Amino acid sequence: MQHKVIDAKDVVIRFAGDSGDGMQLTGSLFADMSAIYGNQLSTFPDYPAEIRAPQGTVSGVSGFQVHIGSENVNTPGDHCDLLVAMNPAALMANAKWCKRTAMILVDSNAFDEAGMKKAGFKTDDPFRELGVEDRVLIVAPITELTELSLKDSGMDIKAIRKCKNMFTLGMACFIYDRPLDYIFTYLEKKFAKKHPEVIEPNKKVLKDGFNYAANMQMIANTYHIEPSHPKKGTYRNITGNQATAWGLLAASEKSGLPLFCGSYPITPATGILEELAIHKSLGAKTLQAEDEIAGICTAIGASYAGNLAVTTTSGPGLSLKSEALGLAVMAELPLVVVDVQRAGPSTGIPTKTEQTDLNQALYGRNGECPIPVVAAHSPSNCFDTAFNAAKIALEHMTPVMMLSEGFLGNGSEPWLIPSMKDYPVIQPPFATSLPEDGKFKPFERDPQTLVPKWAIPGQKGFEHRVGGLEKNHDGVLSSDPANHALMVAEREAKVQKIADFIPELQLDGPAKGKLLVVGWGGTYGHILSAVNEVRAEGLEVSRVHFDYIYPVPRNTGGILSGFDKVLVCELNSGQFANYLLGLFPDTKIVKFNKVQGQPFLVSELVDAIKEAL
Amino acid sequence: MATLSFKDFKSDQEVRWCPGCGDHAVLAALQRALPKVSSALNYEKERYVVVSGIGCSSRLPYYMDTYGFHSIHGRATAISTGIKVANPWLTVWQACGDGDALAIGGNHFIHAIRRNIDINIILFNNQIYGLTKGQYSPTSKFGAITKTSPYGTVEHPFNPGSLVLGAKGTFFARSLDVELKLNEEIMTAAALHDGASVMEMLTNCVIFNDGAHRNISDPATRADRTIILRHGEKMIFGKDRDKGLVLDGLGLKVVTIGQDGYTEDDILVHDAHCENAGIHMMLADMKYPDFPVALGVIRDVKDVTYDDGVRDQVKDVMLKSKIHSVDDLLHSGSTWEVE
């Protein structure tokens, strides 16, 4: 059979297997290789909360989706063109994600009676049972072929079987016309020091997989995805958590203040703490605290002592930090709090993504307790968002909440590496001179910005006391009613003033019309793709995306008022929509919400936009 | 550097503790100790930070003319830890109560001790919640009758000393609020100690738990019911300096010098620097009436501190790493060029 090479604009591949099958690695390798090849891409790891859930069961299935294309790849893709299922459970869990035209590649050796039973199949035809028998099925004895490929390698059978993901990757590389060199280099680098003996076997099994796919005569079509022509420069792949950590390090460099991160491990935010722990060479200090409260409290202490202080967490951890956040507001100390949101409430679904912490970020504290809130919109955008959060915190003397999402934290994308010379210097309002009476007044404000001065312990003559009790401008305790009202108003006004220092909303589309589509955070790519799709059908819609949530950009009201309807799309039950409605009650807001622990599908957004029109 | 005095550490704020509260005396001892510490270690005043949580004793930072942070309930130890790690040059003092440090803040307390971070913790132990007006605390005696235990508590108290030593504490001292001289001495020793120093001050709450420590603090009987331990000195006590401690099997025993064949030579010599905490644990656990209650520096041993560890690791990695700027970082690892 002569196979045909088809030029595809974009394809989506979903690798799925047991959580020990190495699917995350396989998917990342495929993604990295595609990035270097010049494709645009977006990835989405979808893995279970258990590290090693019962083998062969649906709850133990780990997936990694990669979307590669020549242009306009804004999301990891809704449905896939190729599903790789390493066992029956992986097929069971993922068959629903296959396009009508999809290929399904399975390891037939795993589809024995026991495996089928564990996965919950009732018949002996898994494809028919799942209604995917009409897809292009590639049934290959991958385990057997891997064993055969490596029988002379000297490796034991357990180690050999671990290589079957490489065999599969080789097959995928054939199908999508990917050169193997990148993976060869990766293997050489990764194992050069510790396990040089596994480099050649892995290369061999990868090549054998590639050749097998070429020779088996079962694959009618292969696909070629033209490299796109991105901007010139140096690129790298980056995950959201990594970008967050690096953005904070960048803010540390630009402010000249050492970075301190006090955190407690929590999925899906732990990656930030782990990443910062590596970069001590940039002066970063990380403290793995005894609990979430100690995470933020050590950070508050570090901030008081003059560091750029950070605490990172996810929803349940943020709940624990609430009281201390109030302290940082009251003491008017700079602090960055990163919340990588996950499905809640309570423990919820730790590994699944949501945008359900917005209310908590905005309001989850006692008293009148304003905290600026910013949100990242893509994995690489976490860099700028973290940098900006730190800049606001340090220049406006306030804790700042940065909302990320599991989807962003673990997702990755290629990133045109910026140059630090293009980033602004961060200038905290350090106290440099004492007033005439010689007494430093910790809550006396700059008349323009309403920001108090920052005197750091160790500065001679600036001794003063801060704390959770209400004080007057001089820093003296006060329960005077008028003083309390004044201080409450000033702390609020200080945060509102930040609106003068952040960029305006960028309107995509006409300024007046029937429908404005609104999003915030990690739904950016999905909404952008959906709006483009709707426009391609000749419909007119405009779009804005909020990176700054509290305060909102100054032109928000003006933009909203230009539209008959405003469709707010978010992964919660309408928290941002309600917030906007509170600020701009005359807006005709329509909500589109999803709370399934999963990102939007572009297709469902397209339907929602059309319905709103 | 100008010599500092008591007055330099006194703020202009009115002290608002109840008249007769034991906290007044502890504050006075601290204000007297810090000038001595300053001249011993050549510390400037701006180097001191006083941190507290919530409770009566946590008002202390307002009364000290130093940098001060009156934080939230139970969290002083975590705030202190952050300050010290962020800037090890600062010298951190912490005031906290028995409820603050051992109930709501118990977790931070034991972990600060485990890490051996160089902070000085004054634990005001009045065995009651004073600021909330009289509920039992984790150090209230078994059976204590308070507003929340009208029929007596049915829970065992913590002995802060055993807790500190159990967490491998490197410095523990105990004293009574009224022992002004001893307290100055203890605070100075704590300042000289590298690592977490815990000073338990048995304080009297005149309003809600008056006389909680009277059986040992009463001047008439104090000398017979307490023993002041000093490193290198014999464990002798009593109004007539005729009683002492000896080892008896695996435990301690009180003996009278000159009776039952015991001479001064038999009396134990206090070794606060002894690595093995066994004897320190026994001393910290001594209770009246079977034993005198141990006051003074019970344990003071050297060990690596957390703040030094963090600082040294950063320095070490800085020397070895090839990444010295964020630009270096951004270009590290796997990258590719688009021409």
Image (spheres, rainbow, N blue to C red):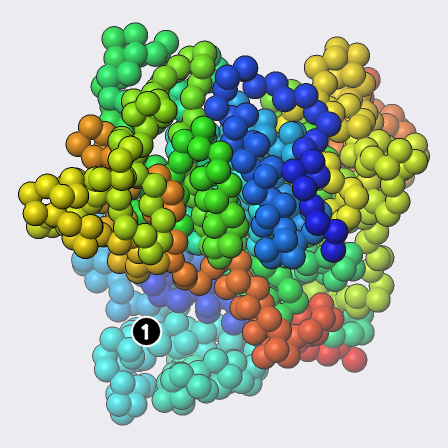
Question: Looking at the picture, does residue B39 appear above or below residue B219?
Answer: below
Left or right for B233, reference A590: left
Residue type, numbered disc 1:
Lys
Residue drawn at (77%, 48%), measured in percent from left and top?
A: A460
Rendered image quadrant of residue A578: top right
At a point 84% along the width and 51% down the height, the residue shown is: A427
* Residue A45 visible: no
Q: Quadrant of the C terminus of chain A?
A: top right
Residue B35 in percent (x, y) is at 63, 45
Q: Quadrant of residue A163?
A: bottom left
Name the element at disc 1: loop
User: Viewer-proximal residue, A377 or B44?
Assistant: B44
How far from the left and from the top, in percent, is residue A494? 82, 31
Residue holding disc 1:
A162
- The residue that appears at 26% across and 62% down in the rendered structure is A111
B188 shown above or below B20: below
Subunit of mark 1? A
Q: Position of residue A59 (x, y in %)?
A: 33, 48
**In-front residue for pair A412/A364:** A364
Q: State the image coordinates of residue A45 (x, y, percent, origin top left).
A: 50, 56
Q: Looking at the image, which is closer to me, B207 or A234?
A: B207
- Horizontally, is A315 left or right of B232 in the view? right
Res. A448 in view: yes
The reply, left or right, for residue B272 in relation to residue A179 is: left
How many numbered callouts? Answer: 1
Q: Residue at x 33, y 23 (%)?
A: B220
Q: Residues within 10 Å of mark 1 (few under 14, many from 20)?
A: some
Q: Which residue sits furthest bottom?
A: A152
